[in-house]
Amino acid sequence: MTQPATDEATLPPRTEAEKSHPAGGKDLVRVPKAGLPVALLPGAKARRQWLRLVLVLAVLFAGAGGGYYWWLRLHPALPASIVFGNGRLEADEINIDTKYAARIAEMLADEGDLVKAGQVVARMDTRDLQASLKKSEAQVRQARRAVDEATANVTQQQAQVLLAQQEYARAAYLVQRGFQTKEVLDERQQQLDGANAALSAAQLRVIEFEHALEAATHDAELYTVQINDDTLVAPRDGRLQYRIANLGEVLPAGGHVFAMLDTSNVYMDIYLPTEQAGKIKYGADARIVTDAFPKVSIPAKVTFIATQAQFTPKTVETKTERDKLMFRVRVRIDADWLRGRTDAVSSGLPGVGYVRTDAGAAWPAALQGSTVQ
């Protein structure tokens, strides 16, 4: 289908302004008669495109300005006595390991479980230790009977010594009066000396058997300790983060079974420049606000201030790129506040830590320390 040609016959007559303007064919759009298409010239198309671009930019700037104003309403300016830095919540990681080489016999917990201090999470196979313990307990009973027998022998020897003393005294009395010979007195002396020597030997045998009893008792206690150590328990209240070994695996001494997080010891490391870190003191009051709970201000204290500056980690944002060397400051969440709020302070949550450099300054209303319901 061919378009109709546009010639001077189909166009309306040109005005005097068009005839007198030499560039009228490029800047003006001539309207043809009814029923004929309009041909837009390049200059008009460019102006329309620029107009659209200007409108889009105006909308974008208006939206950005409104968003910035709203952000300022939600985040009012902080006083000079409060410094802040971003970071992530962290908790001390504790490995629950085997003390001796053994096979895992029972798994009584799994990753993600909340556990209490002293709760049994796994048991190792202790059948060999149980047998050794029974053997040691039998040796203890045998050693105790030996001690009882040696003690009875001491009592017997003490009776022999008493008899020898009495016979010696009788013979000495008779010798003095001439009714007994000196030879008999010497025999009684020898009998007394022999009884005393036998008593000393019996007493030493008691000491020997008591030492044997102590050794057997210590062996039994050692096996009991090993069996108890093969019962793996949670050392602190916390959450099991990883299960590293499975049921039936044979682990060496020190083999990892679980990795848990100590939920009673949660903190955030923030990085501050020299002029801010130098004003902070140990024990300074602090607040933590996480991205997950932006309306919750968590009470904390400063527990660590680095003595040397370090390069800022990649995960930490700074105000300017020039802040390459920063001081690490650790703010630890109050332990009393943490009780019953474990889910609200999960390890790894990003947030912002605020530190008050002036103890006399008041916290802004948004950082007064609201609580999680």
Image (tube, rainbow, N blue to C red):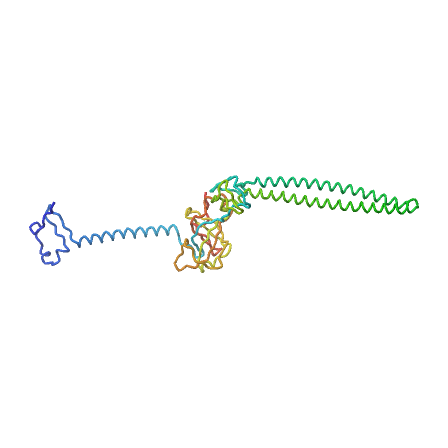
Q: Is residue 345 left or right of residue 36?
A: right
Report if residue 341 is visible in the image: no
Q: Is residue 181 left or right of residue 275?
A: right
Question: For this rendering, which residue is in front, 359 or 177?
Answer: 177
- Count all numbered tags in the image, as a single digit: 0
* Rendering coords of residue 170 (x, y %): 88, 44
> What's the residue at 36%, 51% (across, down)?
71
The picture quadrant where one finds residue 131 is top right
Image quarter where the C terminus lies is: top left
> What's the residue at 85%, 43% (across, down)?
167
Question: For this rendering, which residue is in front, 348 or 242?
Answer: 242
Q: Is residue 175 left or right of residue 219?
A: right
Question: For this rendering, which residue is in front, 213 or 370?
Answer: 213
On screen, residue 161 above or below 361: above
* Rendering coords of residue 180 (x, y %): 91, 45
* Rendering coords of residue 347 (x, y %): 45, 47
Image quarter where the N terminus lies is: top left
Question: For this rendering, which residue is in front, 205 or 237?
Answer: 205
Q: Residue furthest right?
A: 178
Report if residue 250 is visible in the image: yes
> What's the residue at 39%, 60% (across, down)?
322
* Rendering coords of residue 101 (x, y %): 54, 45
